[in-house]
Amino acid sequence: MLDFDPTGLHAKLDDAKTAARALATANTAAKDSALEAIAQELLAHVDEIVAANAEDLARGRENGIGTGLLDRLTLTPQRVHALADAVLDIVAIADPVGESVRGKTLPNGVHLEQVRVPFGVVGAIYEARPNVTVDIAALALKSGNAAVLRGGSAAESTNAVLVSVIQGALVRAGLPAASVQTIDEYGRPGASALMRARGYVDLLVPRGSAQLIQTVVTESTVPVIETGAGVVHILLDASAREDWAVDIVRNAKVQRPSVCNAVETVLVHADAAARLLPPVLGALREQGVTIHADARARAIFPDAVPAVEEDWETEYMSLDLAVRVVDVLDEAIEHIRRYSTGHTESIVTNDLGNADRFLAEVDSAVVMVNASTRFTDGGEFGFGAEVGISTQKLHARGPMGLPELTSTKWLVRGSGQIRR
Amino acid sequence: MLDFDPTGLHAKLDDAKTAARALATANTAAKDSALEAIAQELLAHVDEIVAANAEDLARGRENGIGTGLLDRLTLTPQRVHALADAVLDIVAIADPVGESVRGKTLPNGVHLEQVRVPFGVVGAIYEARPNVTVDIAALALKSGNAAVLRGGSAAESTNAVLVSVIQGALVRAGLPAASVQTIDEYGRPGASALMRARGYVDLLVPRGSAQLIQTVVTESTVPVIETGAGVVHILLDASAREDWAVDIVRNAKVQRPSVCNAVETVLVHADAAARLLPPVLGALREQGVTIHADARARAIFPDAVPAVEEDWETEYMSLDLAVRVVDVLDEAIEHIRRYSTGHTESIVTNDLGNADRFLAEVDSAVVMVNASTRFTDGGEFGFGAEVGISTQKLHARGPMGLPELTSTKWLVRGSGQIRR
């Protein structure tokens, strides 16, 4: 890591602004050509990318980083091919820029039209996931934004080569190299400067651990979209069908436990606990899930460890599940209010009134009735790409597609009108 | 002002959260009844309000605050009536809550619907304008949000009575008193705490001077919408019609110079300067406008003071105008890029290509062709109410109506579906 040189970083941000102007007026065909060039260049440089990645992996092993992190850091030739394919998938997604959001002609003949425009410069701060480098670069490019990336020191060698390959493709396609830049070489001080680069960074997206997101949200003076953490709940209501309860909880916990839309806590109505807990939790135990249950749930399903306060707050991201018995719907909603991160909650019920109350009163990005929480996903929602899942209320909430990487502006066309 | 007591402030924020839950599920009729009750109670307490205002005015005069500020601080019986009328106007505006934004049924039968929901708790920080207290309270209420108001020490007595009157009306209408609260009694430390009340404040709107807005944007860790400052430009292109140039510039400068959509700088193409500057600036001089012009403009229109660098950066909000001659469209766009606050810019032209380039390349919330910049206004845009004019790109850009005071959530309705 070099010493922090704000001059160099500011020059990069200036270049990003200049590139953003060119991108804002680039048409879809030009942007798609650049994406195709990026996919080609990634494939043409597989060996170079994998070699740089080997340096990061060696350094990571020396520094004793965990196996999960090492796996996310690893780029095999096969994974580079998958990255190139993912870039080509973005070619197929509709370009949101220029979309007319609404419009009208005022009585005086002035015509108003609100259209989607790129943000300008989009920053991203993430950790040790070189796939995010390509992913964010491609999504930003398609939506007409310049990208400034801080991918963390653990993946610095890989990211440097990836950005260099992407820049080569951009130049070949006639777009500015500075459309995609990394600031990894400025280390943590660079990341801090990015968070405070008002007037340069129009939007900052953190991706990674809850701690990283918290730091970015707290330290930033530029606009941030908070993505992420999911302490996700499923409520099994008194009237829940047993087969749906079993299927939905198992799918939500076991299909991919390490992602944010996996369930972490199951609440069960006292009237249904004896009927539902044995089949639901039995199915989970068969899949190796550790149950952390309160005393009432353990009285019915003894093959569980006692739940402690911390269990209700934890995003396990593993084959663990917290279980609690509640007496009334209000108690369940209150539990969710207290412990949820506002990502996704689902109720399994056959009671229309309770379904409606749950939908109305639970204040999360996605609220479900009789469906697996795993559906909270840009791909499942049909967005074609996923920028992340917003758990904030400003600008975007829930799965974000390409339109969420745009702002709008009003175009006003008159013929000499003045205000009376 | 009391010493800062975080316990008391946190209790108010807790109460606001609880009130927000009740408001989120209150229907339009209930909210409209509360608005009508507020209008009635304001009229029933005119004397009390004016008496409290007299205290603030007396203190203001003692402290030597300016006449402009004193005027904005003043509530006469007539102005209280106007405030009550403004509250009734909000009854007539459509309730954005519950509006279906988009929806679809996935191939597996899962139905998705994105609906508008209130933010929850909306904070406002503003200065010495008691009308904003009523205005924001009514807009927040109609959009289902609880309001926490910090109106500044200069209007503390007036705001205390206004909030008390509003709370009386809320209780009479069956809604929680804590739907509208002031935290003026906690002074500046209270304002700072509000800016950092993550998890309590879902949206913070600063209204007032550029300095106040800057402070809120920089210090806040809660989501903020930046409103306001307008260094607004009009470009008179080589082909501009003289009558439109005269009308639009005069209207934009003179009709109401103290507002953010008034023009501050006129750029004129060199090929049209001799033709347009005498009639355009002559008309302004007749209205008492002081012209701050560059050397080339003064060579044509000598009745002007020399413009200095600071003139290009200044939001005069007065009968002053900066004028500069430019040689090409790019030079005008570059000037705007450098000095604009991104509020509103307009080109007067008969050249289609230049109009299109101006609309595409000028990166402001509102970009106009052949129209007065004074049209950038929620009322003029037909929104029925104006929450403010956003100069940021996240969430809202340009005039904000009631829908901009809402977030969304996804309602997902299934029948036992799981992810494959």
Image: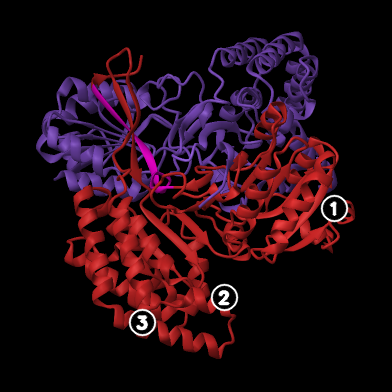
Chain colours: A purple, B red
| Badge 2 or badge 1: first in the primary sequence | 2
Is-magenta flag for residue B44?
no
Q: How busy is the neighbourhood of tag 2: few (under 14 within 10 Å), some, or many (20 plus)?
A: few
Is residue A406 something one can see in this rendering?
Answer: yes
Percent x, y of residue B51: 36, 85
| Badge 3 or badge 2: first in the primary sequence | 3
Percent x, y of residue B228: 57, 56
| Residue at x-position 79% and y-position 52% | B278
Up/down of A149 relative to B246, above or below: above
Percent x, y of residue A32: 65, 14
Query: What amino acid is found at the position of numbered circle 1 in the picture?
Result: Ala
Q: Main secondary structure of the magenta part?
A: strand
Task: Give the magenta part as a residue range.
Answer: B401-414
In the image as oriented, which residue stretches furthest toward the bottom? B62
Q: Which residue is mark 3?
A: B50
Q: Secondary structure at mark 3?
A: helix
Q: Which residue is mark 1?
A: B297
What subunit carries mark 1? B
| Residue at x-position 73% and y-position 16% | A50
Query: What amino acid is found at the position of numbered circle 2 in the picture?
Result: Gly
Label 3 to label 2: alpha-carbon separation: 19 Å
Q: Between B143 and A412, which is closer to the camera in this rendering?
A: A412
State the quadrant of the N terminus of chain A: top right
| Badge 3 or badge 1: first in the primary sequence | 3
Q: Which residue is mark 2?
A: B68
Q: How busy is the neighbourhood of tag 3: few (under 14 within 10 Å), some, or many (20 plus)?
A: some
Label 2 to label 1: alpha-carbon separation: 32 Å
